[in-house]
Amino acid sequence: MNEGKKKWIAAAAAFVLGVSVTAGGMYAWMDSGGRIIADGETYDEYRKIAEKYAKLTEIEELVESDYLWDVDEGVMMEAVYDAVLKALGDPYSRYLSEEEIAKMESSLSGDMVGVGIRIYEDEDGNLVISDVIGESPAAGAGLETGDVITEIDGRKADTAEEASAALFGEAGTTVSITYERDDEEETVSLVRGEIRDSSVSSAMLKGNVGYIRIKTFGEDTAKEFSSELSAMEKKQAEGVIIDLRGNSGGLMEQGIAIADALLPEGTIVYTEDRSGERETFNSDSLCTSIKYVLLVDGETASAAEIVAAAVKDNGGGKLVGERTYGKGVIQETVFFDDGTGVSLTTRQYFSPSGATINEKGVKPDIETDTGDERGRDLQLEAAIEEITGQPGKGR
């Protein structure tokens, strides 16, 4: 427990030893020397705090006096803070250490130190590589999308968050990754480095079809997307495929900005807090005139689902692929002076038509499996066909 909290509880306990003085219906608490140390309202507040944290204080004192080995009080209290958020039973509300705060900020900015992979947890609990950043340590070692990570530095990670945190570290340090591919296991040793990863990439496909992939929604995503979309318009592409597959979200305002670029005037999304107070986000009348299709899958989540739901409900481009993940809640991050923080779910968002996204996802207009035994991307082919009216074989 931090020193400030201890002093607060100690002060509350001291009030109990004081005496009350009543005058004109008001009362105060005095110490043994006759000095007034709190009015009645303040005393009641301190007493409630002392009662609330009494057991925690007793446990801490018991550990400090009787536990066999020395303990790190800071580590112990970090575990307490973490447990408070985990007790909510909400997978998105969590306590953030200094390291996790730094990782989150670097990820959103596009500048990070690591090995250059993104990881997600599949329905069987496997930790799967969803993306390998070009010219990164991971790419140089031959790691590929779809590889299953089994160990990091000889230890198993239980969640994608734990695995990502284990891969994050100082530039120049080494980390080993054990992974499986085609039922064969291999371990590689990688040196962490500084990585700059754009959240948006593009290409031109056969049939003069543009392709824009949005990996995540970081600080510059909407700006990067607008630049790529303008380039497709100048090339007079027949249409554009916007790939949101594997996109786990990011900054909500970036998703709203991209939906605004795609849609005419209308509602993009609205949110509600615990009291039902609603906030609505709308698009203006300016939007692209180029035909487009969105690719989505079971890992399309959060801000990416805002874009998908807005496009679907407003009659924009077709959605092709699989039902999206279903993360329809928003977290706000509170930062503390010591560099730590809390990510807390504070609002839920809904599609323009009022549909609930959380735990339901967004159903595509054209449902298609990912691929076949020959490695074809059937979803991409279906998207090309939707744009051109011709079978979308090949890239």
Image (tube, helix red, strand yellow):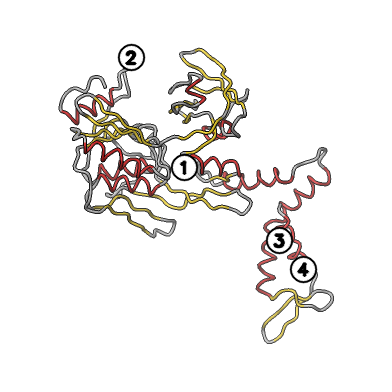
Q: Earlier in the sequence, mark 1 or mark 3?
A: 3
Q: Is residue 350 left or right of residue 154?
A: left
CB of mark 1 within 8 Å of CB of mark 3? Answer: no
Q: Is residue 123 above or below residue 99?
A: above
Q: Quadrant of residue 87?
A: top right
Residue position for label 1: 108
Q: Residues within 10 Å of mark 3 (few under 14, many from 20)?
A: many
Q: Nearer the viewer, residue 276 or 228?
A: 228
Disc 1 marks a residue whose amino acid type is Leu
Q: Nearer the viewer, mark 4 or mark 1?
A: 1
* Residue 17 percent coordinates (x, y): 80, 69
Q: Is residue 284 left or right of residue 325?
A: left
Residue position for label 2: 373
From mark 4 to mark 2, how far is it between C-alphas? 75 Å
Q: Nearer the viewer, mark 2 or mark 1?
A: 1
* Residue 221 percent coordinates (x, y): 38, 42
Give the residue drawn at x 38%, y 43%.
303
Disc 2 marks a residue whose amino acid type is Glu
- The C terminus: image quadrant: top left
Residue position for label 4: 16
Q: Earlier in the sequence, mark 4 or mark 1?
A: 4
Residue position for label 3: 50
CB of mark 4 within 8 Å of CB of mark 1? Answer: no
Q: Earlier in the sequence, mark 2 or mark 3?
A: 3
Q: Nearer the viewer, mark 1 or mark 3?
A: 1
Q: Earlier in the sequence, mark 4 or mark 3?
A: 4
Q: Quadrant of residue 21?
A: bottom right
Disc 4 secondary structure class: helix
Q: Nearer the viewer, residue 275 or 157?
A: 157
From mark 4 to mark 1, how far is it between C-alphas? 50 Å
Disc 3 marks a residue whose amino acid type is Ala
